[in-house]
Amino acid sequence: VPFGEWAARLVACTEGGGFDAELEHWTGVAGTAALPVDAEGPNTVAERRTVSVALDPERTAELLREVPGVFRTQVNDVLLAVLGRVLGEWCGAERVLVDLEGHGREELPGGAAGVDVSRTVGWFTSVFPVALRTGTGWDWGELLKAVKEDLRSVPNRGIGFGALRHLGTPEQRAALEDVPAPRVSFNYLGRFDAGTAAPAVRFLTDPGDPRHPRAHLLEVVGRVAGGRLVFDWAYARTVHEEGTVRALAERFTAGLADLVRFCLAEGVGGATPSDFPLVALDQAAVDRLVGDGRDVADVYPLTPMQQGMLFHSVLEPESSSYFEQLVLLLDGVADTAALAAAWRRVAERTPVLRTTVAWRGLAEPVQLLHRAPVLRCAWC
């Protein structure tokens, strides 16, 4: 699909109301956009300077490979949880506004099905604001869960914000003009080395017109290169001193290392409501049902027939109406351990044999799909 066709589809999608339902979300983004400054000089390209920090290879490997599974997060969730805390402590705010940058190659809602831009040459970028929680008084687990849910609530991965702001109706554009402009931008670019010694991607070094004003006071850009998670903090030397920005950057990497240690501790972990989109559970219910998340793989609703069977079973616990049991007597089993292992393999490959039902304290009953079979073997 040519770039021009995609752009035309984006215009048509916006004019056709494809993003109208998102307006309430974007106008509700609230938090502080103000940052402490060291001076009141011009924030131009000419004054741009950069402080770079890096996480050591061991912590980097743990953050990329082991940490996401603990709370079912993406790497971005972890990075933004730490960034929000560092900026919040600096600003003294409960929420801090940050611009996030996405790749922009999203599915367009409403009549744009079949637009495949996977082989289209062009710069697809979406920039949108989020209000990062700082989690004052929370442990890393509580903060990570909250940030994860906030990011999952962003509609269509943020592409609608720019569409409404630049292509929307005059009323929509006016409404978004009242949203405070974040003074911090964040972009995690992923792996650059892919296991090789030389970087696979090189940054463009031409900064453009030196007189041009910068859109943000701080630009935080991360990547994995040489086995290390590297972050560049760009600032204007006429607004912030190098020591101020370096202190922030070092607190950020220290926070990442601390969060990694927290996540790898025994018994730490959990899930959030967005992990189970088929059921309506709040965080308290998820914590109670799933615990640290290591045992439960998924949560499903019951079918109407299952609900009816559960209702009658609970109403008449002594009734055998919905109780079926088959008893077999096996002779000549020389290796009972092998039989037990075979039965466990059957349960591992059959989800229904790893499912239990929960209903107490819930508005609607649910099924818990366990990762491992819950079997009790009397002979092994």
Image: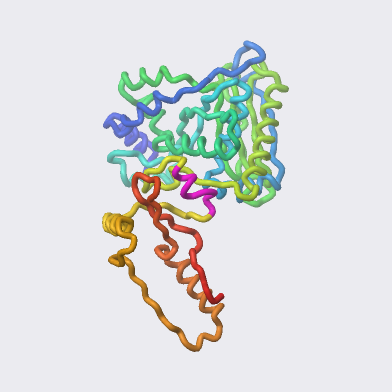
| Viewport quadrant of the C terminus | bottom right
In this image, 37 relative to 344: left or right? Answer: right
Q: Answer whether residue 135 is magenta in the image.
A: no
Region in magenta: 285-294
Image spot of residue 8 (x, y percent): 33, 34
Q: Residue at x 39, y 49 (%)?
A: 360
- The quarter of the picture where residue 52 lies is top right
Residue 89 lies, in percent from the top left, at 62, 24
Residue shown at the point (60%, 30%) measured from the top left: 137
The answer to whether residue 261 is above or below residue 243 is below
Pick out the residue farthest to the top.
40
Say which of 300 and 210 sits in front. 300
The total of numbered circles placed on residues is 0
Q: Is residue 104 above or below residue 377?
A: above
Residue 55 drawn at (x, y percent): 69, 40
Q: Is residue 90 above or below residue 355?
A: above
- Which residue appears farthest toward the bottom when viewing the image? 332
Which of the pair 310/142 is nearer the observer? 310
Which of these two is toward me, 189 or 318?
A: 318
> Quadrant where the N terminus lies?
top left
